[in-house]
Image: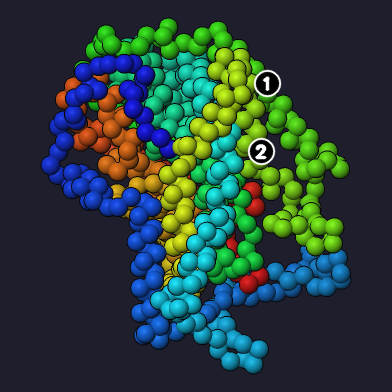
């Protein structure tokens, strides 16, 4: 993501642009900020973690670390019909299903792995500080990077998303939605737009808060309340949204790699693995943000006199869409509907490319490289993301005049790639860390040891969900970046949680909550200073502490409500997205 160098509303000069933040408290927020700023950049963190794995692998060999692999095994029983007769499959064989306990949960036990002679199998650490290990690190360096499942998902998605952002489609769409909203529904609409702004990269941070402030001011409401509502939606609701984005692809790739640590046969996690949960989460965030803004933040601001007039704010006429922008949005909407309609037809019409199940094969009859059996449509989500933003973005650019030459198109394509250059750097070092972890065997040893501990502790899964959310929240105060934190936590916690029945998709959903709800108060959020600049238009002496105090109610309410929503989702047992159950039944 790129950092903005201009003011949030695009104006060329105010007092706040050159005024350093003031009023910062000398308490624990400052200490947190200093600790966070002292940490290395995410790419360097993974480089350091790789070095740690190298050293620990050598220590493990010297100490002769050993552990017996364990497999969670579900107890199976014959499946019977209503009359009590055994259910048979297509080959006439009896169908077995997991046996359930009194609470309706599968009965699972831990079974130690044995060889063909029945003798226990042991895992031992493998050192990277050997001649063979050093050779492997050098020979696999490029492969460790290029083979990351998340790499292609993020790259391809951003080709379309970046172009649509470059040509102004997202900016126009957010302004249009905000400007047509009735006064009574302004707050929930602003929060909902914000919760879906992750698809627009950093445009949500730069465009929506000052736009919301101007709208509130025009309606004689405290502009800071509008700014807070928008920031709460964009940052606090970052893990929600109706649409898959590049970050979803990255999480899916890392989750797949992590799941294969204990179950190599686990299906590839789809980029839409949390889509259903994300979509409804944005609604939950909308109501929670509405409550906090209208019943907590705005009344407090009114008591403090937060409805003063400001001469340097853009008028509603300046924010309104120009005629060509309106035409561009209309044409882009039609193109998007055509793309989605064609996709739906390809799925629903028999014989069309995406209909039914299938696995492409080579001329020899062998499965095509990288292809897997399953619903065809679920395996083309990333190309769908590409075209559903690329083509409407091109249409909008053509109508508004931002796309006229071949060079304009190429620049739009490059825009998305430029925004993920930091992600590519992180991915290179993360690829080394993940593969070093796997080569040494430390990943499986840690997963088995931790998973066995959790299994024997017999903690209820709802409690594990809450504890993991709190862990991620704590991590947000010392390590910035959704993707980098997940790269550290996923290889450890996804395998451990799988051993006690939590699906990788459920762990990812819990991670989204913990990573999102404190984005609005953690000093490590680089966008905090962009919002602070906007805040200082209304409060010249406002500092980082003022902004954090303003946003703290959102963080608390979002954390409680969103976590409760996930617990309710788990209790109901609905899929979190495509091919994404909440539970993992090992050995079934």
In the rendered image, residue 165, in percent from the top left (x then y), is placed at 51, 27
Q: Is residue 335 left or right of residue 81?
A: left
Q: Which residue is mark 1?
A: 334
- Is 99 situated above or below 177? below
In the rendered image, residue 437, in percent from the top left (x then y), is placed at 46, 68
In this view, the residue in front, 151 or 191, is 151
Which label was assigned to residue 384?
2
Helix, strand or loop at disc 1? helix
Q: Is residue 213 left or right of residue 186?
A: left
- Is 296 situated above or below 126? above
- Is 50 situated above or below 567? below
Helix, strand or loop at disc 2? helix
The C terminus is located in which quarter? bottom right
Any part of residue 547 in sight: yes
- Is 163 situated above or below 456? above
The residue sitting at 86% across, 42% down in the picture is 350
Local packing at callout 1 (Cα closer than 10 Å; few below 14, some 14-19, many 20+) is: some
In the rendered image, residue 256, in percent from the top left (x then y), is placed at 57, 58
Q: Which sits earlier in the primary sequence, circle 2 or circle 1? A: 1
Looking at this view, name the residue that lies furthest to the left.
26
Which label was assigned to residue 433?
none
In the rendered image, residue 323, in percent from the top left (x then y), is placed at 55, 7
Q: Quadrant of residue 267?
A: bottom right
In this view, the residue in front, 487 or 177, is 487
The residue sitting at 39% across, 30% down in the picture is 205
Any part of residue 501 in sight: no
The N terminus is located in which quarter? top left
């Amino acid at each position: 993501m790129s950092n903005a160098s201009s003011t949030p509303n695009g104006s060329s000069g105010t007092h706040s642009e050159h005024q350093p933040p003031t009023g910062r408290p000398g308490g624990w927020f400052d200490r947190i900020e200093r600790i966070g700023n002292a940490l290395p950049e995410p790419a360097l963190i993974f480089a350091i973690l790789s070095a740690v794995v190298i050293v620990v692998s050598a220590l493990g060999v010297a100490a002769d670390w050993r552990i017996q692999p364990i497999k969670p095994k579900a107890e199976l029983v014959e499946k019977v019909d209503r009359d009590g007769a055994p259910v048979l499959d297509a080959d006439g064989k009896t169908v077995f299903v997991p046996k359930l306990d009194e609470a309706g949960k599968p009965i699972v036990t831990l079974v130690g792995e044995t060889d063909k002679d029945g003798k226990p199998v042991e895992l031992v650490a493998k050192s990277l500080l050997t001649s063979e290990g050093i050779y492997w690190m050098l020979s696999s360096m490029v492969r460790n990077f290029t083979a990351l499942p998340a790499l292609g998902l993020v790259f391809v998605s951003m080709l379309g998303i970046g172009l649509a952002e470059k040509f102004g489609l997202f900016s126009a769409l957010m302004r249009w939605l905000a400007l047509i909203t009735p006064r009574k529904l302004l707050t929930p609409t602003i929060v909902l737009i914000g919760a879906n702004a992750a698809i627009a990269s950093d445009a949500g941070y730069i465009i929506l808060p000052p736009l919301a402030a101007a709208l509130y001011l025009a309606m004689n409401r405290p502009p800071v309340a509008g700014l807070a509502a928008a920031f709460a939606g964009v940052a606090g609701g970052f893990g929600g949204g109706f649409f898959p984005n590049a970050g979803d692809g990255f999480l899916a790739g890392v989750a797949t790699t992590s799941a294969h640590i204990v179950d190599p046969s686990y299906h590839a996690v789809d980029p839409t693995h949390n889509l259903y949960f994300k979509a409804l989460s944005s609604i939950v965030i909308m109501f929670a943000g509405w409550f906090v803004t209208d019943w907590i933040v705005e009344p407090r601001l009114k008591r403090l006199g937060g409805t003063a007039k400001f001469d340097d704010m853009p008028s509603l006429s300046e924010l309104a869409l120009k005629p060509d922008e309106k035409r561009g949005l209309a044409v882009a909407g039609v193109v998007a509907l055509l793309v989605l309609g064609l996709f739906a037809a390809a799925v629903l019409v028999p014989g069309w490319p995406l209909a039914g199940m299938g696995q492409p094969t080579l001329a020899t009859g062998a499965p095509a490289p990288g292809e897997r059996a399953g619903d065809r449509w679920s395996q083309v989500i990333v190309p769908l993301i590409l075209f559903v933003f690329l083509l409407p973005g091109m249409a909008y650019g053509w109508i508004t005049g931002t796309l006229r030459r071949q060079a304009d198109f190429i620049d739009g394509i490059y825009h998305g790639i430029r925004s993920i250059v930091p992600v590519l750097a992180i991915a290179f070092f993360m690829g080394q860390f993940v593969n070093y972890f796997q080569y040494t065997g430390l990943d499986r040893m840690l997963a088995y040891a931790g998973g066995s501990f959790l299994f024997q502790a017999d903690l209820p899964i709802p409690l594990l969900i809450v504890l993991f959310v709190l862990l991620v929240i704590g991590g947000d105060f010392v390590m910035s970046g959704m993707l980098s934190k997940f790269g550290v936590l996923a290889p450890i916690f996804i395998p451990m949680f799988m051993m006690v029945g939590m699906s990788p998709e459920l762990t990812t959903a819990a991670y989204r909550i913990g990573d999102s709800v404190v984005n609005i108060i953690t000093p490590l959020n680089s966008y905090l200073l962009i919002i602070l600049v906007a805040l200082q238009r209304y409060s010249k002496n406002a500092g980082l502490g003022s902004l954090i105090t303003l946003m703290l109610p959102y963080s608390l309410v979002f954390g409680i409500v969103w976590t409760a929503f996930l617990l309710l989702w788990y209790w109901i047992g609905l899929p979190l997205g495509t091919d994404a159950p909440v539970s993992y039944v090992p050995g079934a």
